[in-house]
């Protein structure tokens, strides 16, 4: 087994790390608290080619894979700038369009996504369906050559920054009469599509929304792949990249928190003695968190390697495990960092408490730790389905 990145991947890691540190966590928090967006960072990352690393070169991308995009997600988060839209637009949507879109859709969307001028967000979650996409209530029905979409979506990230949203709906199979999933590229300014912002206790420049679709009319070419048969494979094509890149972002966040805490504990002195980091009651929890973060990191790059090799089933198992491990490790690392810093850990200045909400959310979204345990029990341990 080879645990080394290639020279090109190492160069990418170093370059993204430098970009992230140029902006830093202070920039991220300032934008979030002012109600702004990380536009400058996004645009510079685009100019440097980081947004399209996983998009084929024929469509203006870097020709890499999810491994390269995971590196970008991890290193920006490790600099204190975890960008959720990297997961949504390049990882989920670009992968789906690349693997299952029509050639016209690839030509239309991928170059603009690679150069950062187009953001496409993803809408699958619904209030009543939870994690069960089989019970989605958003329905697409034919009206001549057009489609009409009706339904609701919740916790949809970055709609206010995007020009399109990739909506997962259900259509009726003419042959069987059964509903089957289909994916539609919907302009965010389409008549009948409205949104309301959700108030979240998370410090992030990327907002969450409820979406309401009221007979949103779409042309035939809005259907991803141009066929209803493309819906289910396209949907699953985006789930593994989502889990892997979310996990990479979580590991980066954990690294950032541990680094900030380690710098503080190595220099903080009380009672005229040595640094507080010499005390095992301080050092051991940080060391334990560092071990958990590194273990999660290994699983992330195993999953990414499997995915890029086309081994989707194995990548599905590893990707879910990576997401679980990363969610637990990031939450542990941030909480441990806050505790190590004491009162300073709760201040904005020291930049760790600002990550508490997002790190905790990583154990819930985009798939909860409980559903991952269900998956592992069923597909790895051979247990009967429990739900």
Image (cartoon, helix red, strand yellow):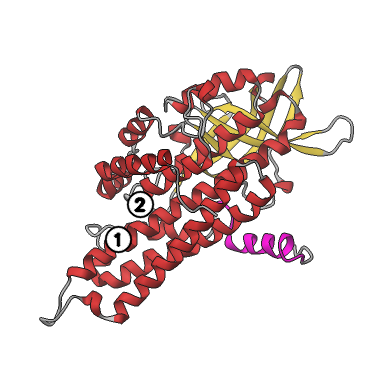
**Residue 362 drawn above or below residue 49:** below
Residue 146 covered by magenta stretch:
no
Residue 360: image location, x then y, percent: 45, 61
Q: Nearer the viewer, residue 95 or 180?
A: 95
Residue 237: image location, x then y, percent: 64, 39
In the rendered image, which quarter is residue 27 located in? top left
Residue plotted at (64% across, 29% down): 184
- Tell me the magenta residue range: 366-382
Q: Nearer the viewer, residue 64 or 369?
A: 64
The 10 Å Cα crowd at callout 2, few under 14, some 14 to 19, many 20 or more, is many
Q: Which mark is residue 259?
A: 1
**Residue 78 drawn above or below residue 209:** below
Q: Nearer the viewer, residue 319 or 83?
A: 319
Residue 290: image location, x then y, percent: 39, 66
Residue 370 covered by magenta stretch:
yes
Secondary structure, mark 1, is helix
């Amino acid at each position: 087994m080879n645990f080394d990145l290639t020279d090109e991947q190492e160069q990418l890691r170093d370059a993204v790390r430098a970009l992230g540190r140029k902006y830093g966590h202070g920039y991220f928090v300032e934008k979030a608290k002012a109600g702004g967006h990380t536009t400058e960072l996004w645009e510079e990352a685009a100019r440097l080619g980081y947004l399209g690393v996983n998009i084929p070169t024929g469509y203006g991308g870097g020709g890499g894979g999810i491994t390269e995009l995971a590196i970008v997600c991890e290193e920006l988060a490790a600099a204190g700038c975890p960008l959720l839209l990297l997961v949504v637009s390049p990882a989920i949507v670009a992968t789906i369009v690349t693997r299952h879109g029509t050639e016209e859709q690839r030509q239309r969307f991928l170059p603009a996504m690679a150069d950062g001028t187009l953001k496409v967000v993803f809408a699958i979650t619904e209030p009543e369906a939870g994690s069960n996409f089989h019970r989605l209530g958003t329905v697409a029905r034919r009206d001549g050559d057009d489609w009409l979409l009706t339904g609701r979506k919740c916790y949809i990230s970055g709609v206010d920054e995007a020009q399109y949203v990739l909506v997962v709906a259900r259509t009726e199979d003419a042959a069987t009469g059964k509903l089957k999933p289909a994916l539609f590229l919907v302009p965010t300014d389409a008549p009948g599509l409205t949104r309301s912002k959700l108030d979240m206790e998370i410090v992030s420049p990327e907002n969450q929304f409820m979406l309401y679709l009221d007979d949103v009319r779409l042309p035939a070419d809005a259907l991803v792949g141009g066929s209803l048969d493309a819906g289910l494979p396209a949907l699953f094509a985006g789930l593994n990249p989502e889990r892997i890149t979310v996990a990479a972002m979580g590991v980066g966040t954990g690294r950032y928190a541990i680094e900030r805490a380690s710098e503080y504990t190595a220099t903080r002195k009380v009672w005229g003695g040595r640094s507080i980091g010499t005390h095992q009651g301080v050092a051991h929890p940080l060391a334990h968190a560092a071990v958990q973060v590194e273990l999660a990191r290994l699983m992330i790059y195993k999953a990414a390697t499997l995915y890029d090799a086309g081994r989707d089933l194995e990548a599905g198992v590893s990707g879910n495990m990576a997401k679980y491990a990363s969610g637990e490790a990031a939450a542990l690392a941030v909480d441990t960092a806050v505790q190590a810093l004491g009162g300073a850990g709760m201040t904005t200045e020291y930049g760790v408490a600002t990550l508490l909400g997002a790190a905790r959310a990583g154990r819930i979204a985009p798939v909860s730790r409980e559903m991952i345990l269900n998956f592992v029990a069923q597909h790895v341990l051979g247990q009967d389905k429990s739900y």
